[in-house]
Image: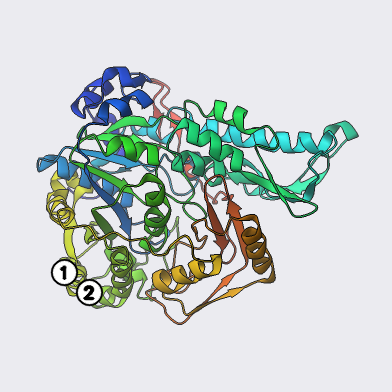
Amino acid sequence: MSTTTFPSDLEIARAAQLRPIPEIAAGAGLPEEGLEPYGRYLAKVTPEARGVLAGRPQARYVVVTAVTPTPLGEGKTTTAVGLAQGLSRIGHATTLALRQPSLGPTFGIKGGAAGGGYSQVVPMDSFNLHLTGDFHAVTSAHNMLAAMIDNHLHHGNELGLDPRAITWRRVIDVNDRALRNIVIGLGARADGVTRQTGFDITAASEVMVILALTTSLQDMRERMGRIVVGYTYEGEPVTAEQLKAAGAMTALMRDAVKPNLLQTLEHTPVLVHAGPFGNIATGNSSVVADQVGIRMGDFLVTEAGFGADMGAERFFNVKCRVSGLVPDAAVLVATVRSLKAHSGRHTIRPGKALPPELLAENPDEVLVGGANLRKQIENVRAFGVSPVVAINAFPTDHPSEHDAIRSIAQEAGARSAVGTYVVNGGAGAEELAAMVAEAAQETSEFRFLYPLEMSIKEKIETIVREMYGGSGVQYSFEAEQKIALYTRCGFDKLPICMAKTHLSLSHDPDLKGAPTGFIVPIRDVRASVGAGFLYPLLGTMSTMPGLPTRPAYYEIDIDPQTGDVIGLS
């Protein structure tokens, strides 16, 4: 099918014949009494359903990750959907677990995150717009804590919280650069204490990460209480529990803790739950969803954000520690355009057409950029997991370039398959599915990259050395002070979630391929104690995106005749 006649993702999704969600649930062994329907094609999965599934055998567990992506992304979600459909087509009952998209990117430059072409999660408009309201629950719980902090200051500050040491900001699920840094409490004395603060996007909220890493409502309540909102004048941490906020926050999250059940275009069940930011947080869907999905069939496929040095590293070192689940295989998504970009000869900019020279047939350029793929294969293997390279095919690719990627994978001892699941759905992922099923049968030798008993610096330096290829770490004065503080507070046994650019294996987005010998600067270290990790900041990280010159919301509207959403991409 030519690119000029290929229908849009929304057109494909609209033409799909969806099955009622109880039918999808029944096929996966979920009892109807374990569902809370939201219309015909969405439902929440209740805790009771987990009890029903408890006696069933555990599925094979597969994580989808990628090479270091371009700003356009390399199709991990599309690959995950296509793989789940492909596994189903070759006879394996499969469930997919994904993050929920943030409205910020959906209305900004990236667009939606339901997959692409004939490998999508549906209903596509519901998936990308609100779903069942979990993001709004996170926003409400987070901002209520922010309001309680300022109320505590206004009414005498009994805990001695230093206004200059408050770390808890506000959140909103919109890209809005004007809210990055603000002053609150202006006006009369009754309007509160004047101080500087700001907004992050909801996906960057610690409450969102708690939703992703919690194992139950009770566990969530405990994690909410451990949230550190700031420090006293004496340098002691102040928690949400001390502010008497954790119980009310958990009450707002009571329904959000239940995963959402949807389906793919080929009726594979999909658990959509949580959407933590990929740069500063875990970038993975929820533990609860995985604990449900692992008992729903033969395979559970999930996706980790960005490249294997980021989302997959956090999946292995953070998420798997919480869930207790051990991955059986990993899929490493690579594209011709990404490896050509890693040759260092091209610049890809979001919102701009790809450079014509990047589209010209050039397998040698793929081989040069293939250093990044080799390193990411090595990164997956560092955890004892077998990688399978998924070559996500684009219409502008050339067979010789696919062959070049296959040769890189073969030399590294990894399986590979070309996927045409955008055009052909599950049928275009059958080769990949067969290789994943084969890899998942191998004896797992899973291991963590570091023990939690290591010091904060030892854990940071292990990640820099083993995952990024760096030769050392340089700590700012502020980072040194924070490490000493966290060690004194007993936070030093938490895992590490490195906050860095997703566009390079290093801290510098301009370093392409697989750079070595670089020194990683740590400018600050922050604590998400409720979520259960520390996150060092490598360079400048924005937690509130801005909108481009021509944002996606220009195209989004409703059909005046039907009321259907149009323009989603």
Q: Amino acid at mark 2?
A: Pro
Q: Amino acid at mark 1?
A: Asp
Residue farthest bottom in this picture? 517
Front residue of 548 and 356: 548
- Horizontal relation, residue 365 to residue 238: left or right: left
Q: CA distance from mark 2 to mark 1?
A: 8 Å
Label of residue 363 in the image: 2
- Horizontal relation, residue 103 to residue 512: left or right: right
Task: Decide which of tag 2 and tag 1 comes sooner along the chain.
Answer: 2
For residue 402, which quarter of the picture? bottom left
In this rendering, does residue 422 appear at all?
yes
Residue 381 lies, in percent from the top left, at 28, 66
Label 2 SS: helix
- Horizontal relation, residue 541 to residue 471: left or right: right
Label 1 SS: helix
On the image, numbered disc 1 is attached to which residue?
403
- Horizontal relation, residue 66 to residue 212: left or right: left
In this rendering, does residue 554 appear at all?
no
For residue 530, which quarter of the picture? top right
Front residue of 456 and 520: 456
Front residue of 44 and 356: 44
Residue 156 lies, in percent from the top left, at 85, 36
Residue 112 lies, in percent from the top left, at 40, 42
Badge 2, how many Cα within 10 Å: few under 14, some, many 20+? many
Residue 3 lies, in percent from the top left, at 24, 50
Contact (CB < 8 A) between labels 2 and 1? yes
Residue occupying the point 87% across, 36% down: 187
